[in-house]
Amino acid sequence: MKSKVVGLTAFAVFALAGVATLCSCDVPVDRGVFNPSGVASDKLVTVKISPNMAVSKVDNQPVNWTRPDNNYSQTVRMPPGIHVFEVSYNDSVNWTLNPISAVAKLTSGNVYTISHVINGQSISIQISTRKNGVEESALFNMNSLSEEDGPLAVYVLRVFNPTLMSPAGRVLLSSYDEDILFEHDLVYRKTDKKTGKKTEGRYAIEMDFTMGGRVYFLEADLSALSSEAFLEMDFRQEAEIIAVPVLCDGKTVTYRYSRPESFVDRVDVYTVTDLTPVPVTVD
């Protein structure tokens, strides 16, 4: 019986009908260097792809790291950071119907392995490194996000998280032309400084670390559209404005737009001010 996909989790889980025996004489295939961003060679990390696994894309770029017989592991050197791997599994008995996205955070100085783990009647895709004899998962966890992970990470930590984590959270973005106030429950309020016009609605952030992320703004009656209903609708298509935070250092954020058409390639720079009240402790 051939295996069928039975579900997906953060690391993709599939039905397993049998287990292939791995060749003990595995000689890794060297895929060289994948380094489109030109990171210094001494900063690159080594990634090993276990037998029966193939990587078709890294950060949306085709790589085709596979072999016709798929019985050998592969190695590649690539930059550290957060990466999205499109991974497939095939041991001639069981296979994934489509590539699965696995997001990993790689750190200089480590060697990583893309592998599979058998859990009863299922198999999961894992990306891990070994430290002091202990295997540690490198699958991306939002709790491990730091400002060293790039502009989008800084944006999430300084602009998005304060309103997400506290009902009193408020972050103000201010430019020459307008103010944008982000509040808890995915609320935004805009003020045009020239006309005084005020608008409000819901917003969502798509944290795609390979594409720079996107912020979707949908003008709406807040009393008529809850945040739950907003997230359940097709907000990616309905949003009037899509902004990409291309730069963010915590003090300023730079948006480049992909919607509306009249905003495409426009760049706006905002100062960032966290207005969240500081909790008062009483002795």
Image (cartoon, helix red, strand yellow):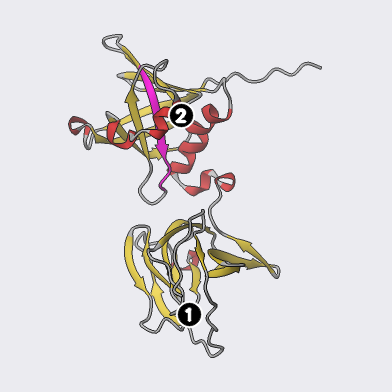
Residue extent of the magenta highlight:
200-208
209 w.r.t. 49: above or below: above
The extreme bottom residue here reads 25
Q: Residue at x 53, y 33 (%)?
A: 161
Nearer the N terminus, badge 1 or badge 2?
A: 1
Residue 134: % across, % down: 69, 67
Select label 1 or label 2 by which is in front. 2
Quarter of the image holding residue 186?
A: top left
Residue 238: % across, % down: 28, 31
Q: Amino acid at mark 2?
A: Glu
Quarter of the image holding residue 243?
A: top left
Q: Nearer the viewer, residue 239 or 144?
A: 239
Residue 100: % across, % down: 42, 60
Q: Is residue 113 visible?
A: no
Q: Is residue 254 left or right of residue 171?
A: left
Residue 27: % across, % down: 49, 87
Q: Amino acid at mark 1?
A: Ser
Q: Report which residue position mark 1 lands on.
A: 73
Q: Residue at x 39, y 29 (%)?
A: 203
Badge 1: residue crowd in 10 Å (few <14, some 14–19, many ≥20): many
Q: Helix, strand or loop at disc 2?
A: helix
Q: Is residue 21 magenta?
A: no
Q: Report which residue position mark 2 lands on.
A: 228
Q: Is residue 206 magenta?
A: yes
Dot label at residue 43: none
Q: Nearer the viewer, residue 27 or 175?
A: 27
The extreme top residue here reads 196
Q: Residue at x 48, y 32 (%)?
A: 160
59 w.r.t. 141: above or below: below
Majority SS type along the magenta span: strand
